[in-house]
Amino acid sequence: MGTVMRLGDLLIQARRVTPNDVERALERGRQFGGRLGENLVAIGAIDQRTLSSFINRIPVEPQSIASTGIDETELVELLLKNIYVGRLETVRQFMSEIKLPYHMVAELVQKAVDRLYLQTLGRRASDNLLDMAYMFTEVGRKTALEAMERSRYAGAAPVTMEVYTEQVNAQKPTNEVITMARINEALGSLEMGPDVIEQAGPALNSGRAILMYGPPGNGKTTVSVRFASVFQDVIYIPYAVAIEGQIIRLFDPSIHIEVAPVGVGQEDVSFIRQSEPDLRWVPCKRPFVIVGGELTLEMLDLRWDPTGKYYEAPLHMKALGGCFLIDDFGRQLVSPTNLLNRWIVPLESRFDFLKLNSGKSFKIPFEELVIFSTNLDPEDLMDPAFLRRLPYKIEVGGPDAGRYRRIFQSECDRAGVPMPDDVFNYIVDRITIDKGLELAAYQPRFIMDQIVATCRFMEQPPHLQKRYIDYALDNLRVKRPSDAPREHRTAAQVH
């Protein structure tokens, strides 16, 4: 029947409280009584306003078939399809698949019985009404097959586009306040210039599009992924959305990461809310979608499944409430101009339009952080008018000597290899003078991985031998006629 939603689990996953806070609140509850939320507020783990806002964003189960906004006949047919596809028998199994509460499933089953689609087999294994079993009649099986011909979608009952839109607006990324401490925590040991961090904070808080640019190999993609992780809230993703009688499948396990229970004994959300959570929605971390050179304009439209006869949500719809990174911008199959023209309205207005096969267009919210990342010259990719529409432009350049040294030292520490100053200077001179390359943040790991691999092949412990260093450096860039012969190098002596 779905995972029971525990308030403490959700608060912990959203980084609102810690497991220790929950344990302390539970202990206080054992001494003085009261609910978990009340005791979390009492011990100062969370304030009442934040707690109330968090709880009120959890979708509540519908009270009746009419309140779902989905046609009753469509729900009965969805029930029949679930029974057919899953070979289901009991009410308990029906509830688990369709994700609706008992009283509604019982009503749908009764309507199916009244219409001679199902017949009862009695209770199986217990006296519990949830174990009441049913089977198809001939009419019911025929009706299920006819419904499958119209659409093979089976699973959770959909939510309406109106309800979905309200939920997206309630959980948009700008609801979270990003601080310097959060960004530093997300970056962890990643070496990044302070200017990048100071520019990123206001950009992340704005929710507006960000352009990350600069030479390759300096961590634009890595930084973008880390920036996405600064968002900590739990959001709710529906399994499917209904529009104009059509189904759009939305929840995607490859993108939407369901929050995992922490395992601390807590109260159900239903006890706090005086109502049950709606199991048609999955509590998830904010999604992060990355697309690269494979991106086409078609990937930003609804995808019709001709076999299943339902729609699959486009990637940017799956990213709502989270981040959408267009990596290697300018190298897509679609031209930068066409892609940017497609994004002008959503980026400005915060909504987008999608179109059904019938030609009917409908509006969806566009509450997500869009990041363009490129190592090409932005002025070659887009005209000044579009550049103005990207309010935050963050250059991720190569590291200075000090930061490069720290990056290299951490890679040497990882390999358990000491790095004397003369060796470091030799490497830097060979890269910048012999190879004519700029220092880049990716180089230390590349070089050390190559050296370690050579040492392993030579059956030697990892060490910085000149010959092995040269092999690695030559793999940074192919030799050119203009390269200085390395045997004539005298800037450093490496043994």
Image: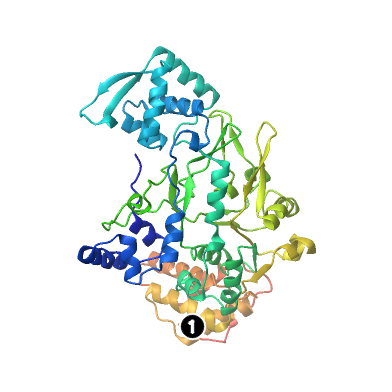
Q: Residue at x 47, y 29 (%)?
A: 75
Indicate left or right for 7 with 72 as reference. Answer: left
Give the image's coloring scheme: rainbow
Q: Is residue 156 visible?
A: yes
Q: Is residue 383 visible?
A: no
Q: Which of the 4 quarters of the picture holds residue 102?
A: top left
Indicate left or right for 79 with 215 as reference. Answer: left
Q: In the image shown, does 320 or 468 lie closer to the viewer? A: 320
Give the vertical position of 232 relative to 122 (above or below). Answer: below
Tell how many labels. 1
Name the residue type under label 1. Val
Task: Residue 156: give x, y in percent of width and height.
Answer: 44, 36
Q: Residue at x 51, y 75 (%)?
A: 180
Task: Residue 480: give x, y in percent of width and height.
Answer: 66, 69
Q: Residues within 10 Å of mark 1 (few under 14, many from 20)?
A: some
Give the vertical position of 136 relative to 316 (above or below). Answer: above
- Disc 1 is placed on an element classified as helix
Q: In the image shown, does 271 or 183 lie closer to the viewer? A: 271
- Residue that numbered label 1 is attached to: 423
Give the vertical position of 348 relative to 183 (above or below). Answer: above
Task: Residue 202: give x, y in percent of width and height.
Answer: 60, 71
Indicate left or right for 284 with 381 as reference. Answer: left
Which residue is at the far top?
A: 138
Quadrant showing the N terminus: top left
Task: Residue 403: give x, y in percent of width and height.
Answer: 53, 80
Q: Residue at x 67, y 31 (%)?
A: 358
Quadrant showing the C terminus: bottom left
